[in-house]
Image: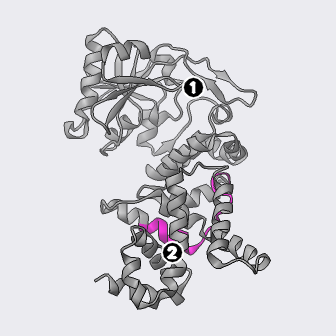
Amino acid sequence: MTPAHHSVKFDKKLIDTDALKVVKTLIKNGYEAYLVGGCIRDLLLGLQPKDFDIATSATPEQVHKVFKRSRIIGRRFRLVHIMFSARKYIEVATFRAGKVKTSNMGQVLRDNFYGSLKEDVFRRDFTVNGLYFDIIKSQVIDYVNGFEDLKASKINIIGDATERFEEDPVRMIRAVRFKVKLDSELTNEISKNISINAHLLKNIPPARLYEEVIKLFHNETSLEIFKELLKFGLLKFLFSQTKESPFIDSTLINTSKRIKNGDSVTPAFLFAVFLWDAQNKCFESKNNKNKNKNRIELMIMASDEVIRKQIQQIMMPRWLSNRVKDIWLMQHRLENCNVKKATELISNPRFRMAYDFLLLRSESINPELKERAKFWTNLQK
């Protein structure tokens, strides 16, 4: 198959200079190297890419030898992270061949068979992510019609959808995210196969799904993504205790606004909102059965049970689950605290998150709390 070559001139301000240095250094050392994937997709759309990934003919060991400040990571997929600061790295992957080691259920266990650029293309997920940029010739290399699919606002999978989703069920989540992010349409093949194969997400380790969930909801289109996950039957395999509600809608709209304004967001707030209804129901159940225990004890018991169920699907680091519990436990105090203790509560490091939580509740599911929310708002002025 002969690839299409599209000559393009990207805005240099949008391209990471460190990523260019990595590509140029690899080429100088005799290897093929290209910018690849989402960064090319975003550059073609005139967007600022968040990450710049590189694909090369060099093996991870060869890349590591060229770049002293680098480390080889991963077992399932071996990659190299080239460090530029404590928080910044450029990810480099070796071209992969088409053959992979899979489990009995079809999921990829090992994918460290190295190949050519052409072979690497067909190991990628969607055509709009299968584009490579040759920085020397200023050309986009396209084996899978990704360039045209991007122009047509179409999300198309590379290969057979059933096989690709069985190899890696996380691709179903990404399909939904790209659909919303790029304001595109999924092909009928993808849509049909997501609905059929949604249950395969149960086979994905909770730790891996944590990062994917952050990408799903910490963006400017989180509410639309939530509704798409519901539509395709994916949400229950991520948050089985979560149901659609005005509180969640308000929170996701608020999260998107904060991101647009450059304000900080935390996954703790997201998890606290998604699991709030389950926490309340669990508390009520325990309250009916344990009349001899006080409210705090029952709240902690309910919180632990809800979180324990959630981490079977998506990992919640200890710091995150502790903050979620803090937000929940502080709601009762915010609702009932007298003026004398209010100053003490405001100084609590978790106050701001708990207050924001109360405020969104008052604006959505608990209008009876509006006066209380106003009290805390005025007190902070």
Q: Is residue 359 visible?
A: yes
Residue segment shown in magenta = 235-254
Which residue matches tag 1?
76
Q: Is residue 184 visible?
A: no
Which residue is drawn at the image coordinates 20% and 36% (left, top)?
A: 12
Q: Is residue 35 left or right of residue 156?
A: left
Which residue matches tag 2?
330
Mark 1 residue type: Arg
Q: Nearer the viewer, residue 206 or 57?
A: 206
Q: Is residue 240 magenta?
A: yes
Residue 9, compared with residue 256, is above or below; it is above
Q: Is residue 243 left or right of residue 5?
A: right
Which residue is drawn at the image coordinates 24% and 24% (left, top)?
A: 21
Mark 1 or 2, which is nearer the eye?
2
Which residue is drawn at the image coordinates 55% and 24% (left, top)?
A: 75
Q: Position of residue 15 (x, y in %)?
A: 25, 36
Q: Secondary structure at mark 2?
A: helix
Q: Position of residue 143 (x, y in %)?
A: 46, 24
The C terminus, quarter of image: bottom left
